[in-house]
């Protein structure tokens, strides 16, 4: 995560250090507790001033004391931000600029006058839980829709299992397509899906590819040709166990024990939980899962003669 800080916002926020609110506490938690954050200050924060403020400014003292954090200086936030639309980026801004109105994926801008409410609203949007067998239609999960999100990863080895066994489109519609309709808003969208396949286990790679091509075509017909789909074999390396079912984006992680299969008549001891990146636990979960997936995907090149990944 990269956080861009304007001097005016920083000074205003420091002046509020004796005020208590949920929004202020959220931002202080990011400053104080979050690891592996790149803090980027604008040109009004000079390097020499920064060294001096490390002693006198609580904002700078705190961010610079975290060993895993990085400190950078950049006078052109816009240019740098537009070069990376995949990473989560935040601007702490004095006022709205014209370019802030552009819909830049994975970018959040918080302003002096209402940052507290903005932060509280995001936590409310991306934080919830429900009992699976009491909410067959998964009501409320629509909150996860956002034009700012352009990629999701689904780790659920069985979400398309019934389709792979039967090739019946209705088995796609009942779970996978149903789920996407709930959470996908942006037409230009990337989906990574970690699966298990009996066809791959028994070397039926041609049959598997044909089924996944049918799945891809139906998914794009249901949404948009701009949607891209990457299917990943989740069981190639014994050192990696993708047991828990997750949906992961930069903004939230959705967790369920049994999986994203809807339950109608069964009674099950599972629940659905969603955590925002503005909760420390959610941020750490997202960071952990993304690291794990990156390490795993880097190893796929070692499996050239079997199904490792297909992109559509």
Image (cartoon, helix red, strand yellow):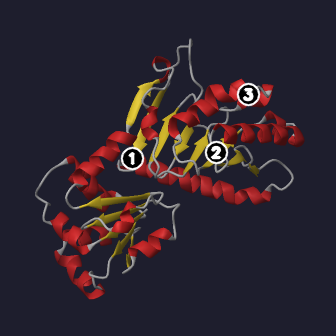
**From mark 1 to mark 2, how far is it between C-alphas?**
34 Å
**Residue in view at x 84 percent, y 49 percent:** 306
What mark, if any, has residue 281 been given in the picture? 1
Label 3 belongs to which residue? 169
Viewer-closest of 151 and 293:
151
The numbered mark, 1 or 2, whose residue comes first in the sequence reads: 2
Label 2 belongs to which residue? 224
Viewer-closest of 28 and 186:
186
Front disc: 1 or 2:
2
**From mark 1 to mark 3, how far is it between C-alphas?**
37 Å
The numbered mark, 1 or 3, whose residue comes first in the sequence reads: 3
**Residue in view at x 49 percent, y 23 percent:** 132
Residue 279 appears in the picture as rendered: yes
- Position of residue 305 measured from the top left corner of the image (x, y, whole percent): 87, 53
Q: Is 90 placed above or below 308 here?
A: below
Residue 238 appears in the picture as rendered: no
Crowding around mark 1 (Cα neighbors within 10 Å: few <14, some 14 to 19, many 20+) is few
What mark, if any, has residue 28 been given in the picture? none
């Amino acid at each position: 995560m990269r956080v861009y800080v304007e001097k005016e916002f920083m000074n205003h926020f420091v002046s509020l250090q004796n005020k208590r609110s949920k929004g202020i506490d959220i931002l202080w938690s990011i400053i104080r507790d979050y690891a592996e954050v790149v803090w980027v200050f604008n040109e009004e924060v000079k390097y020499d001033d920064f060294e001096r403020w490390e002693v006198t400014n609580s904002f700078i003292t705190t961010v610079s004391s975290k060993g895993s954090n990085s400190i950078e200086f950049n006078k052109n936030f816009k240019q740098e931000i537009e070069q990376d639309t995949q990473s989560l980026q935040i601007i702490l801004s004095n006022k709205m600029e014209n370019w802030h109105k552009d819909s830049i994926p994975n970018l959040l801008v918080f302003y002096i006058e209402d940052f507290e409410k903005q932060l509280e609203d995001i936590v409310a949007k991306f934080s919830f839980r429900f009992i699976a067998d009491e909410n067959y239609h998964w009501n409320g999960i629509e909150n996860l829709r956002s034009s700012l999100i352009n990629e999701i990863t689904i780790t659920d080895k069985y979400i398309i299992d019934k389709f792979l066994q039967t090739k019946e489109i209705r088995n796609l519609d009942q779970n996978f397509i149903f789920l996407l309709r709930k959470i996908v808003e942006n037409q230009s969208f990337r989906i990574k899906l970690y699966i298990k396949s009996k066809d791959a286990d028994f070397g039926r790679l041609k049959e598997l590819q044909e089924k996944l091509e049918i799945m891809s075509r139906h998914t794009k017909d249901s949404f948009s040709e701009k949607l891209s789909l990457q299917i990943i074999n989740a069981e190639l390396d014994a050192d990696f166990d993708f047991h828990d079912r997750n949906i992961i984006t930069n903004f939230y992680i959705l967790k369920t024990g049994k999986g994203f299969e809807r339950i109608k008549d069964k009674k099950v001891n599972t629940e659905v939980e969603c955590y925002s990146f503005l909760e420390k636990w959610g941020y750490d979960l997202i960071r952990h899962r993304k690291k794990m997936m990156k390490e795993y995907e880097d190893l796929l090149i070692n499996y050239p003669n079997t199904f490792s990944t297909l992109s559509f």
